[in-house]
Each structure stands twice: as structure tokens, then as C-alpha cells.
Amino acid sequence: MAGLARARQAGTHLGRKFTEDTKEGSRKVKAALAMRAKGVGYRKIAKEVGLGVGTVMRLTASQDINRPFRGRKLPSHNEEKTRPSAAKVEAVEHVSLCLLIGANRP
């Protein structure tokens, strides 16, 4: 253990190399950062480039690359929430009951 302690004290990196420090890894990192800057999602980048999702997230966080939110629109406080009609609720309950007791639907 004296050798490991001496290496740590000297500041030597122990273990596997970081993805960014390898030749192929640096190519993947550049591709991932470019894709993220264009707005591609983490999972798609990871799959196409060949990196882990966590690695892509770590790399983009260190580069401060953010993508604008393009998800579903969240309702504002002023908008009324729409509720299904009573007939629709009754039909769903009927189907659920029929499935529960094993009867055929009308």
C-alpha cells in the first residue's frame, strides 16, 4: 500500500482514463457537444455517439450548453382545466366494469 499512497500524494491519476483524455473519446466528446448545441436530446446523443447518458450530461453541464425547453406546453394559472364530459366518464366506467367482471361490451 505504500506505493499507492505515494502515487496519490504525488497527484498521479489512478484507474481508468477519462473519456475526454483518449483519442477516440475526444472525438466522441466533440460530436456530443455539437449535437447538444443543436438541441438533440441526451439519450439520442448517447446512442448515436456511443457514450453513456450520464457522460453526455456531465460533459454538457461542464460546457454550460443548455437546450431550450421544447416539451409540452404547461397550462397557465389563468386557463381552465378541461374535464371530460359526463357521458365520456360514464362510458369509461362501464367499460372498466365490463372488463372487471369479464362481460362483453354492448
Image (cartoon, rainbow, N blue to C red):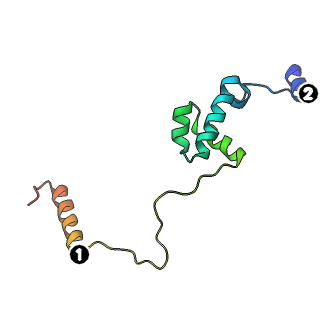
Q: Left of 106 or right of it: where is 1?
A: right
Q: Quadrant for residue 68, please give it.
A: bottom right
Residue 86, label in figure: 1
Foreground of the two, 51 or 14? 51
* Above-or-below relation of 4 to 77: above
Q: Left of 81 or right of it: where is 93?
A: left
How many marks do you count on the picture? Answer: 2
What amino acid type is highlighted by mark number 2? Ala
Please give the name of the residue rendered at 87% of the width and 19% of the height, measured from the top-left corner.
3
* Above-or-below relation of 106 to 21: below
x then y, percent, for residue 72:
46, 60
Judge the density around disc 1: few (<14), some (14-19), many (≥20) Cα neighbours within 10 Å: few
Q: Left of 39 or right of it: where is 104?
A: left
Q: Which residue is mark 2?
A: 10
> For the view shown, which residue lies furthest in the left direction?
106
Please give the name of the residue rendered at 61% of the width and 37% of the height, measured from the top-left corner.
32
Please give the name of the residue rendered at 52% of the width and 33% of the height, measured from the top-left corner.
48
Alpha-carbon span between mark 2 and mark 1:
73 Å
Q: Quadrant of the C terminus?
A: bottom left
Q: Quadrant for residue 63, please give it.
A: top right
Q: Quadrant of the N terminus?
A: top right
x then y, percent, for residue 45:
55, 38
Looking at the image, tell me whether mark 2 or mark 1 is earlier in sequence order. 2
Foreground of the two, 16 or 104? 16
Residue 59, label in figure: none
Callout 1: SS = helix
* Above-or-below relation of 1 to 58: above
Please give the name of the residue rendered at 88% of the width and 26% of the height, measured from the top-left corner.
5
What amino acid type is highlighted by mark number 1? Ala
